[in-house]
Image (cartoon, rainbow, N blue to C red):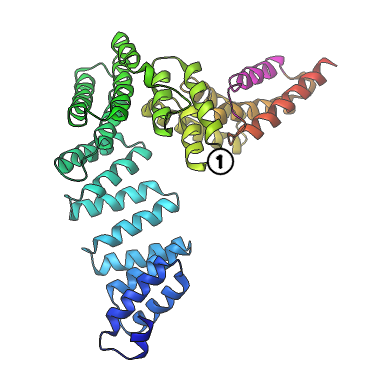
Amino acid sequence: AEQLLQAKTRYRNRVMQILGDLYLKRNAPDQARAIYEQVLAERELAWGRMGMGRAALAEGQLDEAISHFQTLIESNPDYIEAYDALADAYQRKGNGKRAQEVIQQAIEISPLAILRQKQLADIAATNQDMETAAQAWRSTVKLSDNSIHDSPDNYLGLGRTLSELSDGDTSSEGKQLAEEALKALKDMGRRFKDDETATTRKQLVAARIYAGQNRMNDSHKALESIRDQLDTDTLTPEEALDYARTLYTQGDSGAGQRVLNQLADRYSDDPAIMKAIEELMDEPVSFRKKNQARALNKDGIKAFESGELGQAADAFKQALTLVPQHPALNLNLVQVLLKNAEQQGKTSDPALLQRCERCLDQLGHLPPQHKQYKRYQFLMKKVADLKAGSNA
């Protein structure tokens, strides 16, 4: 391609486009950028603007990449790849809600794209927008039927999401969602009957659906039917996470924590898996309770920063009724109570330190790999020192 450019070919633009792509594939974004800058200096071309965005993305220049993709979408609203790249940039920046909005815009233009529907389902679930996730999974299952994209993951994704939506909801609507979830799993079992791994995962999700509808006998039967396949030393990370989730839903939090701790020991050097373990360990509850607890945590932090220690403590205590073993929430409450004790000095209420100890006792399961572990150790020592000082 470089030789053709030097020879001044009449296909110069096409050669430059190919060359830019090749530089990006070879992880040479600076050289790709030089090509695209040269193109755009002469005139605005969609592929040149797209290339500039991709080069910026490869260099980690997220704001610049977002600007290029937005410019391209404004001038070429049907340039669908720009939406995908823009969503990717927002996700890398940690703005999942904006990424979801962009993917939804792309789906309005191209609603039959299976992989984009699947991407929307994943992003929406991460954003705790389970209604959107469920609808995207429904579309994914329908569109992938009899195609190369048909996969157990599609049915499992729908089943998991509907399980979240129906969890604890025994109204007619909740029961309907649970039945839809069970039907999706039944369809998966019929289509992939020779896939043993899919069968194991199907039963794990089914057990959660039953538990969420308070059908505990059915839940335990579903789990018992695959007990022989549940060797925590050999389960894949996704299977182990599903297993732990199911144990939590059945009320066996101790067993759920043990599964996660074993998984953490096996994958301590894998950041993505460790993040998933921590998220489940911190919030082993339905998405509705997660959202309530997160909102209360934000209120507590805001009150603490404003010096309103009483309001902060109340918010953290309320959040802990939803997720009693949440590390950050327990440690946030400990920090507030310690601040209160420090302000009161020698006249501080002994009950403050006792409550701190109860919060710390909730975190005895915390593995050393957890991001809150060092903070846990620091506050545990601080409480112990204060207690020793008050007893002196």
Q: Amino acid at mark 1?
A: Asp
Q: Residue furthest right?
A: 392
User: In the rendered view of the protein, which quadrant contains the N terminus?
Assistant: bottom left
- For the stretch drawn in magenta, the main secondary structure is helix
Q: Please provide percent x and percent y for residue 69.
A: 34, 64
Is there any visible trace of residue 127 in the rendered image? no
> Which residue lies at the image location 27% right of the left edge and 44% below the top edge?
118
> Which residue lies at the image location 20% right of the left edge and 37% below the top edge?
138
Query: Which region is colored magenta?
Result: 349-367
Q: Is residue 173 left or right of residue 59?
A: left
Q: Where 45 sits versus 230, above or below?
A: below
User: Residue 357's quadrant in the figure?
Assistant: top right
Give yes or no for residue 357 being in the magenta stretch. yes
Q: Please provide percent x and percent y for residue 186.
A: 19, 24
Q: Residue furthest front?
A: 194
* Residue tagged 1: 269
Q: Where 300 sits versus 360, above or below?
A: below
Q: Is residue 268 left or right of residue 339?
A: left
